[in-house]
Image (cartoon, grey):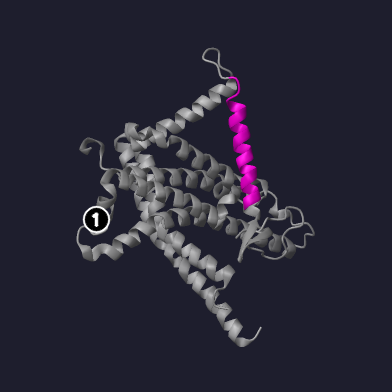
Amino acid sequence: MMAIPKFLTGSSELNVSGPKIIGSFQIGSITINFTETIILEWIVMAVILFGAWFLTRDLKVKGISKRQAIAEWAVEAITNLVRDTMGARWLSFTPYIATVFLFSICGSLLSLTGLRAVTSDFSVLVSWAVITFVMITATKIRFDGLGGYLKGFMSPVPVMLPLNILSEIATPAALALRHFGNIAGGGVITALIYYGLTGASRALGLEIPLLTIGIPAVFSLYFDLFSGFMQAFIFCMLTMVFISNAAPSEDET
Amino acid sequence: MDLNEAIVYAGSAIGAGLAMIAGIGPGIGEGYAVGKACEAIARQPEASGAVTRTMFVGCAVAESTGIYGLIIALLLMFLKPFT
């Protein structure tokens, strides 16, 4: 949805498009496209993997290094967040939450470098939402049994069946759309700001669009930094709330 | 551009603008939620962490309708499904 803003020449025309298709291959009659997003996701994964490897090198019990202190702080922060939100019995979900959180932040902050944000591709968010949906459903089946889960669609009265199915599908759909809408919308607005400022500096008779220096940074602070962190946090928060709500509360079990 | 296409383009642009009226609801709702959160923190400053977290999640849920409007607007503007 977002065009990479050309920093030096200025984008003379508004170009808002989806991720570029780099290559494609065929399996039978199905064409599978390789998009820009996949390459960028690999880069993000490599960065996260390298960061994790770098921070956890030669761990010690006593006399810890700065690297280890950072790693311990990060792990502790996420663990505390999960414990506060879901309760101590759900601590096994910490790795998933931490992964999504890191991936989402790094994917959104990619737009600061001028590349496309990974999270402004709908398919990425849909895949995360599907994972969350599977987890919610698995938790429901684990605690209520398959029969109880299916019976849940009929509650409180069987007439509610279509509405219950709809609300079940709406959960992951809203989860994915919220994150996607925020990041992609921010990207579109950034592209519009560049387009508008380029036009304004043309109108002032400047060859190089000098107005695009500095002013977009203010908006980028909100749309890239704040929005990116906020959406990562909210995605994880809602995932945790949905999963822990799928089970009966602690004193009932 | 012939007349039919022009009408479709104009309709899409107007529709995208109209879809963004959906922004009113989340604006009012989130403002109200944040105001209440401020009151709650003023009353109980020690609960500010929990209040802020709950407020952000509530804001995110309230924002959904606005985001749906935004997505419809983006679809109309850039995918032009009716041409």
Tell me if A59 is positioned left or right of A6 in this view.
left
Tell me if B28 is positioned left or right of A204 in this view.
left
**Farthest residue toward the right?**
A207
Give percent across and percent down for residue B66. 43, 60
Report the magenta residues as a range: A38-58
Work out which quarter of the rendered image holds the C terminus of chain A and state it. top left
Q: How many other residues sit within 10 Å of disc 1, few (<14), some (14-19) or many (≥20)?
A: some
The correct choice, above or below, for B79 with respect to A206 in the image is below
Tell which subunit mark 1 falls on. Answer: A
Our reading of the magenta stretch's main secondary structure is helix
Tell me if A169 is positioned left or right of A62 in this view.
left
The correct choice, above or below, for A166 with respect to A147 in the image is below
Q: Is residue A156 part of the magenta span, yes or no?
A: no
**Farthest residue toward the front?**
A28
Foreground pick, A80 / A35: A35
Give percent across and percent down for residue A81. 41, 34
The residue under the point 42% across, 48% down is A132
Give percent across and percent down for residue B2. 64, 86
The residue under the point 38% across, 59% down is A169
Give the structural element (helix, strand or loop) at label 1. helix
What residue does disc 1 label? Answer: A151
